[in-house]
Amino acid sequence: MIREHAHIVAVEANYLLVSTQLKTGCGSCQQQNTCGAGIISKAFSDRRAEFRIAKPEQGQFRAGEMVELLLPETALTKLSLLLYGTPLTALLGVAVLTTSALQWPEGAVILASLLAFGLSFWSLKRWLKKHDLRVNQLLTIQPLQTSA
């Protein structure tokens, strides 16, 4: 499970509005004061993400409370492969098909490949909306366990 801490911003009838702190990869490096990425990450350090999650049947949740969000690794892996793999496969597949089988000129191959790349994003967006697949539906929420 991938775990993330979040604050409950608001409690609605069936949903919780939660806020998480977006992290950068530059938090513990000793070169962050001289590194370009470290300087940029400091400039945008107060980045938050807010989203709604279905409220669990059990448990009482209040605004201001800390909770833990859980996401199965398999779900993240599958969605990542779908979202990254589909456009790249479309791009490369059309490039290979139009170059070898159809013997199109280079400019036409590039344009067709970019068009397939863009259409794959559009198709994925429509498919995900049709299947109502959202990451917040895959999340599990539980009260934050404090160690004594």
Image (cartoon, rainbow, N blue to C red):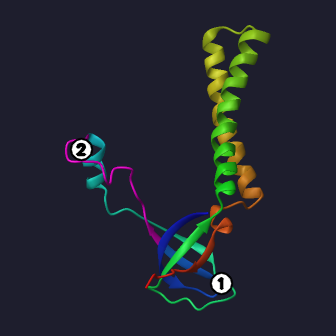
Question: SS at mark 1?
Answer: loop
- Quadrant housing residue 117: top right
Q: Secondary structure at mark 2?
A: loop
Q: Would you place residue 45 above or below residue 100 in this image?
A: below
Q: Position of residue 46 (x, y in %)?
A: 32, 63
Q: Residue at x 63, y 40 (%)?
A: 84
Q: Residue at x 66, y 50 (%)?
A: 77
- The amino acid marked with disc number 1 is Asn
Relative to 147, say whether 4 is above or below.
above
- 99 horizontally vs 3: left or right: right
What's the residue type where badge 2 is placed? Gln
Q: What range of the chain is rendered magenta?
A: 19-35
Q: Residue at coordinates 37% horizontally, 62% vertically from top-left?
A: 47
Residue picked out by circle 1: 14
Q: Nearer the viewer, residue 72 or 45?
A: 72
**Residue at the image point whose x is 66% and y is 8% from the top:** 105
> How packed is label 2: few (under 14 Cα within 10 Å), some, or many (20 or more)?
few
Report if residue 123 lies within the magenta region.
Answer: no
Residue 104 against residue 94 in the figure, above or below: above
Residue 1: x and y, percent? Answer: 61, 63
Q: Which of marks 1 and 2 precedes in the sequence?
A: 1
Residue 82 locus on image (x, y percent): 69, 44
* Magenta run includes residue 24: yes
* Residue 147 occupies quadrant: bottom left
Residue carrying label 2:
31
Residue 15 placed where, x, y %?
A: 61, 81
